[in-house]
Image: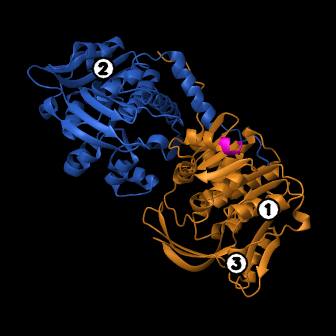
Chain colours: A blue, B orange
Amino acid sequence: MSLLSIGTVAYDALETPFGKVDKIIGGSCTYIALSASYFTAKSNICAVIGDDFGQDNIDLLTDRGVDTEGLQIKEGEKSFFWSGKYHNDMNTRDTLVTELNVLENFDPVIPENYQDCEFLMLGNLTPSVQQTVIDRLTDRPKFIAMDTMNLWMDIMLDDLKSVLKSVDMLLVNDEEARQLTGEYSLVKAAKAIHELGPQYVIIKKGEHGALLFGEGRIFSAPALPLEDVFDPTGAGDTFAGGFMGYLAKTNDISFENMKRALIYGSAMASFCVEKFGPERLLDLSNDEIEDRVAQFVGLTNFDMEFKEGVR
Amino acid sequence: MSLLSIGTVAYDALETPFGKVDKIIGGSCTYIALSASYFTAKSNICAVIGDDFGQDNIDLLTDRGVDTEGLQIKEGEKSFFWSGKYHNDMNTRDTLVTELNVLENFDPVIPENYQDCEFLMLGNLTPSVQQTVIDRLTDRPKFIAMDTMNLWMDIMLDDLKSVLKSVDMLLVNDEEARQLTGEYSLVKAAKAIHELGPQYVIIKKGEHGALLFGEGRIFSAPALPLEDVFDPTGAGDTFAGGFMGYLAKTNDISFENMKRALIYGSAMASFCVEKFGPERLLDLSNDEIEDRVAQFVGLTNFDMEFKEGVR
């Protein structure tokens, strides 16, 4: 099945305790599409860049089989640029620069051959742009997931709530879930998000894994315990891309299959943090991915056959 | 098999956003012994109290089958007292009062009928007292686990490191593991702790669950996602008591069985936080415990039979 992803395709400047890069391909849509490309053969993107964006970077996407027909190139404009610096614990970062550039007037265009997409991943963008993409699809996709961020809760909460009514799943991190709902307990926060629209909720907890809520059930996936996190940039989007790519590949939106998708998404995120930017997502092998998934099985698997009852 | 637990038996005053109590039985040994009592029939304690400690509180332990022969009562002295206040997020707390009282000169006495204990849980206490208990056991127990805290790392690090050489497992929280080793990565921290002595390490992460390290393997157990945490006091000790009680009951220290013990410990901790102090640990039924363990299975279980390989 085909997956359509929207979000940013951008240049990032990154600094971590392990080094720095001044200019590397980034953006939510880049990470989502690259990660999903390991699962679904039809990974389409809808995004906007300026004419400063090198063809070599576009090739990184097309080489992975990503269809870039929906990638608009604005002549005479500059691509979205983000610069961030991570602290020593790698869990907190400072945003140094955000230049919207082409994003200021992003008017998403859906190519005709994207209209049959069954799965839609709305990466983090202005809520009104996310809504526009939904509105411009002739048929509602089978499954729509969205990401968002605290900024839109601060300045465009009504728009955000409006989009939430149209989607099947919200993927946010724990702090965003708490801000959106005013609930500290993630169980209560997920319930409050269900009431805003999404039947399914994924709450990402970074190094502590992720929780999936839906159908009155909860599934907890760990993150892989790592010796080193080289660069966390894009890990959340990579997770979302792996999750949605796996759903699209299997064309199965049962809760049981979402659990598997969560594990694949977590495995992809564990690769992402091993190198700068999306470097590690460019040349993974199927064996590497399956080996990583097997590590998750070993990490969480326990056998309760021993149940003799307690005293 | 029998379990010997040492630690504090104390009075606590607790304040949470849900209410307050001025005087309730507390202390690491209390929580460990009560939790373990649901698993092993032989739960022995070694601790000290003053003559202010009510017989009704001692009865709470003996009613659960805990052997209190090793509980010294110091005439004319007062029991250890701790008072704490939790913040709204329930993850941080302020210690308001700490009165050592009888703990200042605690000289642990091991009753003769405790000498055959196969499992020893050294709850958080001065490292030298933990060492004394090990030294006063004629035969080394089959498995020794210890807890500790940041205070001893600050003021008695050499003593602490000396005890670490004598134990099989250290159970600490994530911040303590980081402080002890200077490693932010919990994987690196666990490796550094192995080099200090313990072959097995459990790192507790509160609402994010716990990690077990040993034999070159890692197991990740989630915490149960809860709508409300009424009072987190004693949850870590309750976890340790459930873990060690299950090991003692099954007399099996394989890594596979430690995984199960970790789940039972996590289940017991999830009960502990439902009421003030140890109240919830006084009257659990076997069915309640098995139902809670089944919730952990549902929370973490996924089935990878669907593996068709990625693209």
Q: Residue furthest left?
A: A76
CB atoms of marks 3 and 1 within 8 Å: no
- Span shown in magenta: B194-199
Which image quarter: residue A22?
top left
Lateral position of residue A127 relative to residue B111, left or right: left
Query: For the residues tagged 2 and 1, is the chain the same?
Result: no
User: Where does the N terminus of chain A fall, quadrant-wise?
Assistant: top left
Whole-percent x, y for residue B61 in the image: 76, 71
Q: From the image, tell me which residue sits under label 1.
A: B133
CB atoms of marks 2 and 1 within 8 Å: no
Viewer-nearest of discs 3 and 2 = 3
Whole-percent x, y for residue B2 in the image: 84, 57
Q: Secondary structure under badge 2?
A: strand
At horizontal 72% and vertical 75% (from top left) the residue drawn is B105
Q: Chain of mark 1?
A: B
Q: Amino acid at mark 3?
A: Val
Q: Residues within 10 Å of mark 3 (few under 14, many from 20)?
A: many
Q: Residues within 10 Å of mark 2 (few under 14, many from 20)?
A: many
Judge whether A25 appears above or below B155 on screen.
above
Instruction: Judge by depth and name the residue closer to the eye, B240 or B35.
Output: B240
Whole-percent x, y for residue A150 in the image: 28, 47
Q: From the image, tell me which residue sits under label 2.
A: A44
Whole-percent x, y for residue B286 in the image: 73, 58
